[in-house]
Image (cartoon, helix red, strand yellow):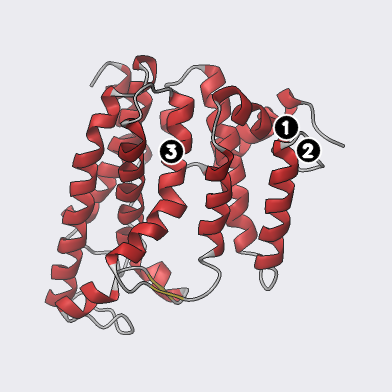
Amino acid sequence: MTLPVPESYDWCRRVARHRARNFYYSFLLLAPEQRDALCAVYAFMRECDDLSDEPGAQRAALDQWRAELHGALDGRFGQHPCWPALHDAVSRYRIPPNYLDETIDGVSSDLEPRRIQTFDELYRYCYLVASVVGLTIIHILGFESPEALPLAEKCGVAFQLTNILRDVREDRARDRVYLPRQDLERFGVDPERLVRDSAFLRLMRFEADRASRYYGEAMPLLDLVHRRSRPALWALIETYRRLLERIQESDFDVLDRRISLSVLQKTWILARAFVGR
């Protein structure tokens, strides 16, 4: 049976609360209806990722998920608990449906082993898996100027570059190398035998500086979203920016451990956002 919209939102809130490690803290600074909409979007995107992990059936599962998405956007909800809430959020905040389709495109692109060749190719990948999230989020946060759109795109690229630097080891274990081949060759790094030597460190510093530039270029976005939403957006950006700083401070010790922010650090960011930084 199709869940009523309030119960669908309840389900999405539970998913976000338990699984949105870096996102959920910033959600708490928003009005309840905005927070619910973000939880609905997050639950949809989380399900995309989970479906891509199903052994042997990823492509078919994602194709079916896309068909269900199109049905849900037309008001045919089926049985998955996220659809009524997602339909309500998309309608309420006028979220362009193509962002949701592009999310599935991004997840689908990871079903095969990846070897990124150029930064242009990496940028496109970052757009599909992260920038479309940012573009969706700012519709919920609210904005008037069209200048917000390219800034949200850059913000998503900064986030995904940070994720890539953090997850070099895990991605390599999955036969995925997102660091562009042109950069690997420039710094003399063999992606098949990653070691934390001087060449690897020079490569990682180069990529981290690139991510930092995208954070800097995206910062004017804070002044373009609706005033009531700015603390939440600042907290989200600061969480990822601080994660990049932690990676840099560790001297890129990402091959032996996973760098993350503690709950205390995330809570401190939330508190600073709440009191106006």
The residue located at (24%, 78%) in the rendering is 195
Residue 104 image offset from top left, x and y in percent = 58, 54
**Are the residues at dot 1 and dot 2 in contact (C-beta closer than 8 Å)?**
yes
At horizontal 33% and vertical 84% (from top left) the residue drawn is 192
Whether 95 is drawn above or below 193: the answer is above
What distance separates the C-alpha of mark 3 from that of mark 2? 24 Å
Q: x, y percentage for residue 65? A: 70, 53
Q: Which residue is mark 2?
A: 77
Please name the amino acid that badge 2 sits on: Phe
Q: Earlier in the sequence, mark 1 or mark 2?
A: 2
Circle 1 sits in a helix, a strand or a loop, which is it? helix
In terms of secondary structure, where does tag 3 sit?
helix
User: Does residue 7 appear to the left or right of 201 in the view shown?
Assistant: right
The image shows residue 170 at horizontal and vertical percentages of 41, 68
- The residue identified by callout 1 is 84
Disc 1 vs disc 3: which is toward the camera? 3
* Residue 270 at least partly seen: yes
